[in-house]
Amino acid sequence: ITLFGQTTYQATSALAITGGARYEREAGFDVPEADASATRNNGGAFVEARASLANRAYVSGGVGVEHDAVFGNEATPRVSVAVYVRNPSNGSIGETKVTVNAGKGIKAPSVFQEHNALFALVQGTPAGAAVQPVGPERSRSFDVGIEQGFAAGRLRARVDYFNNEFEDLLEFLSRTALVTAGVPPP
């Protein structure tokens, strides 16, 4: 079950504010014909503002807060800026636009990943004290680019620099790797 809603308030012709919320009830099944073996209630909310300045610069920024039954609350901020260094025109050399985007993101573990996490498997063993509970996969993204229009907007050239970092990625471990990590062979 997923419920989602959002609304936008147009404060001025150059400023809009959007907010929204989401609720999700997940169910995991060991046997498809049986009742759910695991259920989770997750949700989130966000607020974002979009503004334009003199029809040359456009800024968007906001923050989301995700609540997941597995790891609790996490914030996901983001910001985007686009500036026309040269306004659109019908000439052979058209608009020149510079863009910058930055943000953080998360990806929640699936029910399968939660129930088969190393943390769950080593509870009650000597290795259990050294293993943290499963949490979200995290990302941090940054990009900057320049876009040039040509031939009255029929051609575009774009160059971007991206820097994306990913942390806390969930990985499958084979039976041998599990035993090496301290999981009892049975």
Image (tube, helix red, strand yellow):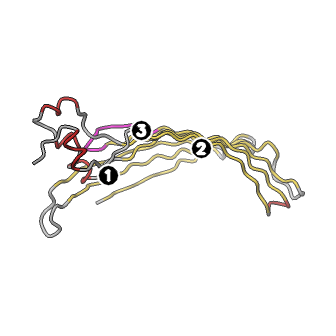
The alpha-carbon separation of the residues under discs 2 and 3 comes to 29 Å
Q: Which residues are magenta?
A: 68-76
As drawn, which residue projects farthest toward the top?
129
Whether the magenta-drawn stretch holds residue 65 is answered as no
Q: Earlier in the sequence, mark 3 or mark 1?
A: 1
Question: Residue at left 83%, top 57%?
Answer: 150
The alpha-carbon separation of the residues under discs 3 and 1 comes to 26 Å
Q: Nearer the viewer, mark 3 or mark 1?
A: 3
Please give the residue where the numbered disc 3 appears in the rendered image.
167
| Pointers 2 and 1 in contact (C-beta within 8 Å) | no
Q: Earlier in the sequence, mark 2 or mark 3?
A: 2
Q: Would residue 21 be found to the left or right of residue 146 on screen?
A: left
Q: Is residue 131 above or below residue 179?
A: above
Q: 51 or 26: nearer the eye? A: 26
Q: Would residue 3 be found to the left or right of residue 47 on screen?
A: left
Residue 7: numbered disc: none
| Pointers 3 and 1 in contact (C-beta within 8 Å) | no
For label 1, the crowd category at 10 Å Cα-Cα, with few meaning under 14, some 14 to 19 and many 20 or more, is: some
* Numbered disc total: 3
The alpha-carbon separation of the residues under discs 2 and 1 comes to 24 Å
Q: Would residue 106 be found to the left or right of residue 145 on screen?
A: left
Question: Residue at left 71%, top 40%?
Answer: 53
Please give the residue where the numbered disc 2 appears in the rendered image.
50
Question: Whole-percent x and y of residue 61?
Answer: 56, 39
- Amino acid carrying label 2: it is Arg
Q: Is residue 85 above or below residue 3?
A: above
**Could you say which quadrant of the image residue 84 lies in?**
top right
Residue 23: numbered disc: 1
